[in-house]
Every structure is written in C-alpha cells, then in structure tokens.
Amino acid sequence: MIKKNKDTLFIDMKYIILYRKLGYEEIDADVFIYNYPQCTITIYSEEQRYVYQNESYPLLQYKDFVILECIDRLLKKGYAPQCVLRNHLGYDLAITRDETRLYCGIFAEGWGANYEELLKNYSKGGHSLECLYTSQLSGGLVDFKSEIHCENGVFQNGIFEKNSALYNESFYSLTGNKTSYSTEFVVKNDELIKYMGSNEIVHVPSGINRIGTGAFWNNLIIKEVILPDTVSCICGDAFVYCENLKKINIPQAVSEMGDDPFAGCIDIEIKNESLDFKNEDGVLFDKSKKFLIHYTASKKNEEYVIPESVTWIGKHSFYKCTNLQSVTISKNVKFMGNNAFSDCRNIHLVNESPYFHYINGVLYDKNITTCMHYSMGSGIKVVNLEKTVRTIGRNCFWNCDMIEKIVIPESVRQIGYNPFANCRNTLIENHSPFYTVIEGILYDASAKEMIYCPPIVAKKGEVRIPDTVINIGRSAFTGCDSLKKVVLPEGLKFISRNAFSGCTQLEEIQIPQTVEEIADWCFSGCTSLKKAYIPKHINILPNTFKYSKAEIIRI
C-alpha cells in the first residue's frame, strides 16, 4: 500500500480541479498531462510531483503549485520551454532570452500571508529585472498577482497578462477607477468585494469591472441585481444562496465566469447579453456549450439530458434542483466539479460517459478511485463504497439524511472537507488505516484532526473532543442540532470554517487559549448560543457568528 505523505497537500480535490482548469488530461489514475507546443508536462498527483524538461519537481507545498501554474502561464503565452527554467541562478523560476541571457528572475510564494511575507522581506538582487509572483484557484478562476522590480521602479503588470508582449520592457500598474463608491459597496481596484447594503433592488455602480467571489453570499434580501456594462468578470459563488434573487443581467463585456455564481438562487431569471455565454431555457453554458455552468432549480422538468457538446459539468451547477428525477450524463462529459448535484433530493443519474461509473447510487471517476456524488433518489440507505476508492470528494454526501450508514473501505487515503455534513441519520463504518472512529466520531488516524461528528451521535447533547485533537475540520459539527455542549481540549489550535454551523441548540462555547485561529462562518446559525468565551488574541471574522446573538466574552 502506498503511504500517505505526512503534512503535505497530498491529492486534494482542489488541486485536481486546478489541473483540469489548466487543461491537463488524466491519462491514467492520478496521472495528468498537457502537451504544450514544444514540450509535455506530466503530473503524478499520487506521488506529489511533476516532470518538466525531463526533471522531477515536488508538489508538496502551496508554493509548488504556484510555480507549476506560472510555468503553464508562460508556456501558453509563447515562451519556449528552454527559456523557462526552474531553480536557475537562485530564482524559483527564470525567463531567459536564450539559454544564457537572463530576462527576468522570479520568486514565487503561496497566496495570502506567505506572499505578503515575501513582499515584506524582499530586497532586490543584482539583476535589473526581478518579479515576485503568486496565484490561486478561487471560485473556479485562476487569479494571480505580480510585483515587478526593474530599473524604472516597481510595477504590478506587464509580464504575465495575456496581452503582454514576450520579453516586454514596458511595465505598468493599474490604479483603479477614481470613482468614489457608496459605503454599501466594498470595492478594491474596481472589484466588488462585498455588498453591505439592504436594498431589494441593487444597482451595482458603473466602473466596477469584477464581481468578487462571494460578494453577495447568502444575501436573503436582494431580489434584483443590475450589473453595469463595465463588468467583465463574475467570480464563482458571487450570488450563492441568494434564495430570493429573481433577476440579474450578464453584461455584454463579461468574458469570464467562475463556478456557478448563482447556485442556490432557486427561481432566478438570467438575462444574458454576453457573446461568451449562452442561456438556453434556464440553463447557462459557455459560448461553446462545453461547460455547463448553471441549471435553474425552479425549472419544472423531471428529466434532463446533458447536451453532447458538454465536456465539463460545473461545481454545484444543479444545486437544489428538487424537481429533477433523472439526469443523463452524456458520452462526452469528461469532468465534474465539486458535487454538481448537491441537494437534489429526488435525483438519480443515467451515465453514458466512459469517464465515470455509476454504481448503486454512487458516481465515481473512470478509475473508480474517487467518490464524486451520491444520488438522493437512489433509495440506497447503506452505502458500501467500492474497494478501489482512494478519495472521498468534497460535499459528495452533503445533506443526505436518508443514508443510515456509509462504509469506508481500506483503500481510502483522502477525505475532502467533511463530505458527510448534515447527514443527520448516518453512521460511519471505517476500514481505512488513515482514519479512525472514536465513539462514533470520525478522525484522522492520529486523532489530531476531527473530521465528522454525525448528528445522530450528538443527540446525547454533549461531546468531549479527545486531548490529541489540534484541528476541528471544516463543517465537522454542521447540522448537529441536538448538541448543547462541546468540551474543547487544551492544545487545540484551529477551528475550521463552518465547524459548528447550524448547531441550533449549542448554548455556550469556551475556546482554549491554545487556539490560534477561528475561521469564518464557524458558529453561523447557532441561534441558541448565549455566551462565547474567546481568547483576546483571536481575530473574529465578520461572519463567524452570523445569525447568532451570542455575547462575546474576551478572556
């Protein structure tokens, strides 16, 4: 049995999606390739490495993925592979004019705090042109940032953009529109980061060119959003869970769109004005109809056959389509985003694609190594995952309260963010050596990370987490609406996003001094929470206590 490498990213589903977004094709189990004009890069995700120019490089840290993405960007721009070099002259990556003359040295780092640290500590070396680079996959779009240091100053643009010439010598910075926006709109560099208002009809101001990831997340007030013709990008999850949103327009200038921005907008009418997308009877595609982005949940159809032009079914694209009873996956579909059919309570699938297997109500990839979806309409109450499964994907059992038991086979080595969240009546039987079940709760094998507390286990009202646990995983207690008390151990360091969301009977929480971070939405929907004792050093994010009236007591 292949060992799971400790303290690495392993084969996280997010990075498999990154490979797919970059255009890589899976040619064998966990082996991906892309044929560039003058070379081929091969990714061995199980072995956490890739091969470029006959050399093997690791995929162990976020930085490694940034470097791989940067190579991809440069090769697709037209730089020759012999001029895009790894670990050259002390740089993570270098662009040369030929095999000897350096054009630009690049230092790369992971998105967020690591990149900010790189910017802070950087001091210019001996070469006239150096660049600091980072990127991330967020909401289905690959974003990047660069800081270019040259003899004329410091700039943010001019090397990596699609319209930048090869070996460009003219660099620039985008200062953003000079427009002063209303305080209802949190805007940075003309990107709408967050809508803070309370209007039912929202006119997004002219000048904004990007609707950011989650900008209107879970806004239950808005009914209509009017986007200006300056908008060119709508990021993934931009309007997710906006259940009362009825009308929106896609302006003509929009050329980019992330993972279903409208998931959870049950009865939305989308007026599409962009030539880069097609809206056919409430189903939104890209212009080639290869990418299915959104299926409107209120459509009355009980059956739907995915067009044969479609090769990619997007993340959450059929979310909450309760009228659908049957969806046919046509023969050319090659990939599916994070549980495309989540919360479709009556659905079963008909699979015609050679890239998937549909067995006893569960959809797997073509190698039957990844569990991707469980069909709520299948009637299967005891789910025995196939003995070849290595990965249980994110959200693939979300809200499946009809399941009584899920059997995890010995072969499983990776479980995405709690895929069992809100499975109210489900117990876990585990046979994998990489995981363990203690008093009905699923942990990793070392019991350092808590993954899933079944709501049925929490019915006793109190849960004590073992002293070994340092991380409470994402959505670990989601839906445990009988939980009144949880005892957290000293030594706990992290409480992940949505960890206790929807614990409606939780009355009090005491956060140990050892905790370093409480993620956003952690206690959202904890409507009975009266007091939360939180160490003074912990930063409380805006939605940590969303829909909760708890008194925050700093200790």
Image (spheres, rainbow, N blue to C red):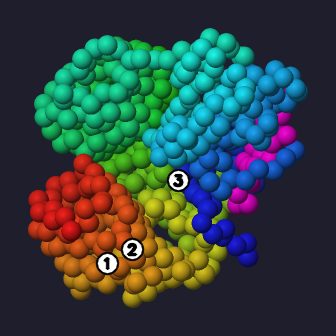
Say what amino acid the circle numbered 2 marks: Leu
Say what amino acid the circle numbered 1 marks: Leu
Asked whether disc 2 touches disc 3, contact meaning CB atoms under 8 Å apart, the reply is no
* Residue with the most extreme top position: 170
Q: CA distance from mark 1 to mark 2?
A: 7 Å
Between 110 and 69, the residue placed more toward the observer is 110
Examine the rendering and report whether any part of residue 467 can be seen: yes
In the structure shown, which secondary structural element does the residue marked by tag 1 occupy?
loop
* Residue found 18% across the figure and 29% down from its top: 184
Image mark for residue 492: 2
In primary-sequence order, the first of circles 3 and 1 is 3
For the C terminus, the quadrant is bottom left
Between 89 and 447, the residue placed more toward the observer is 89
In the structure shown, which secondary structural element does the residue marked by tag 3 occupy?
strand
Q: CA distance from mark 3 to mark 1?
A: 45 Å
The location of residue 263, given as percent across then percent down, is 35, 42
Quadrant in the rendering for residue 180: top left
Q: CA distance from mark 2 to mark 3?
A: 45 Å
Asked whether disc 3 touches disc 1, contact meaning CB atoms under 8 Å apart, the reply is no
Tell me the residue that label 1 is attached to: 488
Asked whether disc 1 touches disc 2, contact meaning CB atoms under 8 Å apart, the reply is yes
Q: Nearer the viewer, mark 3 or mark 1?
A: 1
* Residue found 21% across the figure and 79% down from its top: 485
The location of residue 110, given as percent across then percent down, is 56, 45
Q: Is residue 13 left or right of residue 249?
A: right
From which residue to which does the magenta span run? 30-53
Tell me the residue that label 3 is attached to: 350
